[in-house]
Amino acid sequence: MNNSPEQLNKLRWRCRRGIKEVEIPLQRFFEQYYVELDAKHQALFQQLLTCDDVDLFEWLTRRSEAADAQINYMVDYILRTLAA
């Protein structure tokens, strides 16, 4: 994956969502773990950032699960990683 400073800044900005229950875990995960992820997980994280804020809120607060198994996996991965 392209981890240039410009690309990382774009991703960092995309983590800003305006809903604290979404923004806080996305930003924490990005800042602490993103660059250490393999290409598959980085791609999944980037895909997750394309989802609607309302959906992200539902998933990150465990109110519902994503229909897409890969997105659901990434949400779970983020929450488990931040809980460790």
Image (cartoon, helix red, strand yellow):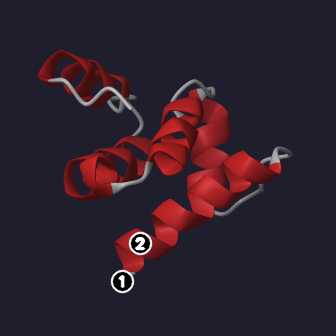
Query: Viewer-proximal residue, 14 or 56?
Result: 14
Residue drawn at (21%, 57%) of the image: 32
Residue 61 visible (yes or no): no
At x 50%, y 41%, the residue is 45
Q: Is residue 63 visible?
A: yes
Label 2 to label 1: alpha-carbon separation: 5 Å
The type of residue carrying mark 1 is Ala
Crowd class of label 2 (few under 14; some 14 to 19; many from 20; radius 10 Å): few
List x then y, in percent, for residue 79: 49, 67
Identify the residue under disc 2.
81
- Identify the secondary structure beneath mark 1: loop
- Dividing the picture into quarters, in which one does residue 47 lie? top right
- Give the SS element for disc 2: helix
The residue drawn where x is 36% and y is 83% is: 84
The residue to which callout 1 is attached is 84
Please state, as top left, top right, bottom left or bottom right, where the N terminus lies in the image. Answer: top left
Q: Residue 14's spot in the image, x, y percent?
A: 36, 24
Provide residue 74's location: percent of width, then percent of height: 59, 54
Residue 65 image-quadrant placement: bottom right
Q: Position of residue 19 (x, y in %)?
A: 42, 37
Query: In this rendering, is residue 8 above or below 74?
Result: above
Dots 2, 1 in contact, CB < 8 A: yes
